[in-house]
Image (tube, helix red, strand yellow):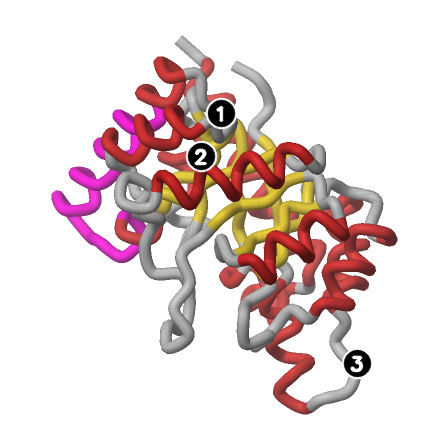
Amino acid sequence: MGKLRLGINVDHVATVRNARGGDHPCPVRAASLVAEAGGDGVTAHLREDRRHIRDRDIERIKDECGLPLNFEMAATEEMVAIARRVRPHACCLVPERREERTTEHGLDVVRAESLLKTVTERLADAGIRVSLFVDPDPRQLEAAARLGAPVVELHTGTYCEKTGTARETELARIRAAAERCVELGLECHAGHGLDYATVGPIAAMPAIAELNIGHFLIGEAIFVGFAASIGRMRAAMDDARAGASTP
């Protein structure tokens, strides 16, 4: 079982910056601190309405932070053009509705397979690794494999929101989906809503190669500092993965 990678989403550093205008706090500075704090990559979502991350943030994170950039984006012509110009390490295609506060569900790859295939091919032609953000539904995974995306990211938000037996049921769905990814030849990532209390069971799944976590860590940083919040998450992930490896 390999090391579980940790990508840090810096969107909400930009949210705080934009609340007052100006340049502080700077999401590029946050991205530059990720490696020394124990992270393996940086995620940033450039939304249509630019509510947090801005175009210049994406360019600077790509050029200055020294870690792979996972560029979250909707499958639109505007975003494809930006991605092909900036050339991040990876693009994660996500559903996007202007009225939502955050990404609330996965892509409907089955319904949008033709469009997503075209977008995936255009990004791949630019040397960009494509990931599709999906719910833990085997139909969506099979569609992702058909259209040629090498990676999927499983939406863990529903698992994090549930309690008791409902949470266990959703955890079982995620586990089955991660195992199905292996069967289909897809690299499996996961993320959304994870915190110190919920990350362990996800991190323990050997089929998952990477977690992407943001909002919780930015919020926790207010109290303990950015590096400390990431470091504790890194330790929680590593402990869970090590425990899963122990007979």
The answer to whether residue 240 of the structure is visible from this angle is no
Q: Which residue is mark 1?
A: 187
Please check the rendered image and state whether residue 161 is part of the magenta-colored stretch, yes or no: yes
Q: Earlier in the sequence, mark 2 or mark 3?
A: 3
Q: Of residues 183 and 28, which is closer to you in this image?
A: 183
User: Do callouts 1 and 2 mark residues in contact (Cβ within 8 Å)?
Assistant: yes
Amino acid type, mark 3: Asp
Q: Which residue is mark 3?
A: 23
Q: Which residue is mark 2?
A: 152
Q: CA distance from mark 3 to mark 1?
A: 36 Å
* Image: 26 above or below 197: below
Residue 39: horizontal and vertical position, in percent? Answer: 68, 42
Amino acid type, mark 1: Glu
How many tags in the picture?
3
Q: Tag 1's secondary structure?
A: strand
Q: Earlier in the sequence, mark 1 or mark 2?
A: 2
**Which residue is at a point 27% across and 45% down the rendered structure image?**
111
